[in-house]
Image: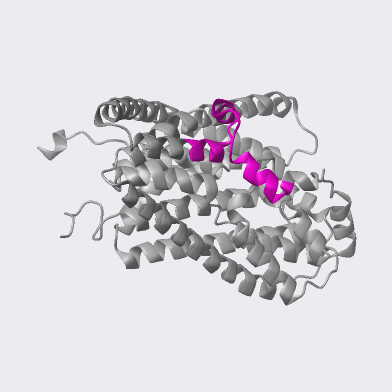
Amino acid sequence: MNDLTPHRSPLRSTGVQVTLGLVAGLALGMLLSRETSPSAFTTAFMPVLDTIGTAWINAVRMTVIPLVVPLLIVGVAGGEDLRATGTVGAKAFGWMLLLLVACAALSTIVSPLWFDTLTLDAEATARLRATAKIDVPTADALSIRTFILSLIPLNPVKAAADGTLLPVVLFTLLYAFALGQVGDGPRVAQLAFWRGMADTMLVVVRWMLALGGLGIFALAAVLGQKLGANVLGAIGFYFMVNIVLHLIAVVAIYVFIAVNGRVPVRQFLRALVPASVVGMGTRSSLASLPAMVKGATDVLALPPTATGFVLPLCASVFKLTSAIYWPVGALFIAKLYGIDLSTANLLLVSASSIVLNFSTPGIPSGGMLLQVPLYASIGLPVEGIGILIALDTLPDMFKTLLNVTSDMMVAVMTTAQGGGAERAPVG
């Protein structure tokens, strides 16, 4: 009777579709980039792909706030013990800090050894330096005062409309903890509404992910056409160091999951494939959040605390990649401008990547612009930040991959029962 059993085609898998879209899009884009002058086809076709890709990103991002808010409220107020939720948050922060220190140590130790082998062509570096243009924000835009005040929105609805997730998350947490203090009647009624909204939004997320193959293909084609296939010299070296270090960190997380055994590593991989590919295609861990929630729920069977609290919290404030690319970027700019970056200054950059990780300002390229005063204090040219921003497209794909992987690891380590998601709970 086995021959009568329907077999689902692998091509219907979301993970397979978005992976094929990524590969095919990059191949097409790099092929078109070889044209000495854009053909009529390229001139007409690329704007269409750009529109399709941007529309798909917007469609995914529009689900983030409506999904995060009910998940947070249900995850916090729906728990039996609010103190337990606070304990989970403290554990999540501890794992974030541990991962940051480990990645900063990796980057600080390994990167200088690689950059010592780099010899740059004087003419090529002169041309590259000539492209360094940056609009440096005012000091107040990057100050601690501005960051703290930005966390308390005058209008939470406007903050949600503007897509500034962290203030929305903090307001939602405040609301959820307050809801946990009201009577059973109002609390149960509201929780029923928010659960219904969360379930509905998960359906919308599945619809958006079903279009992921097309959306990723369009985004990857535009990316490949801009980058081209020939990335040489200093840029190629910078890409190599950045990408390899991020991949080492990703592999280390998978090895840790395999050794720890809280969830089977194959399930962990299967849960992360759609979110990882969406993240690499969109270069946004926030855009990957709906897919992460789906994988954590459907594949890993993590509790609501993980999907409604830990994952949204990590996606909002945790950027593990800064611990890697801040030291790499500083070494690259120092090499580019012929500056000897001392060990003390490199350690200062690494420490800053940890301390300032949770305070990235809500402005374009905020993670890199946050380094402007740091560069000025250690004698690196501030205009070098402009080069890093210009070169961030390809490495950013792997940065997002690491962020997504580390977010899921924190969720597993703070909420999963030992022995794996499909096994009976221990004890």
Between 158 and 337, which is closer to the camera in this rendering?
Answer: 158
Between 315 and 78, which is closer to the camera in this rendering?
Answer: 78
Q: How is the image coloured?
A: one colour
In which quadrant will I find the C terminus? bottom left
Say if residue 229 shows up in the picture. Answer: no
Residue found at x 78% / y 56%: 373
Residue found at x 42% / y 46%: 311
Q: Which residues are magenta?
A: 142-171
Q: Is residue 376 left or right of residue 389?
A: right
Say if residue 258 shows up in the picture. Answer: yes
Q: Position of residue 172 (x, y in %)?
A: 46, 36
In which quadrant will I find the N terminus? top left
Q: Position of residue 273 (x, y in %)?
A: 42, 47
State which quadrant residue 122 falls in. Answer: bottom right
Is 165 part of what is drawn in magenta?
yes
Is 278 part of what is drawn in magenta?
no
Between 392 and 174, which is closer to the camera in this rendering?
Answer: 174
Picture layout, residue 284 above or below residue 268:
above
Question: Mainly helix, strand or loop, the magenta region?
Answer: helix
State which quadrant residue 312 falls in. Answer: top left
Q: Position of residue 231 (x, y in %)?
A: 72, 54
Residue found at x 28% / y 25%: 189
Between 259 and 317, which is closer to the camera in this rendering?
Answer: 317
Q: Is residue 11 left or right of residue 366?
A: left
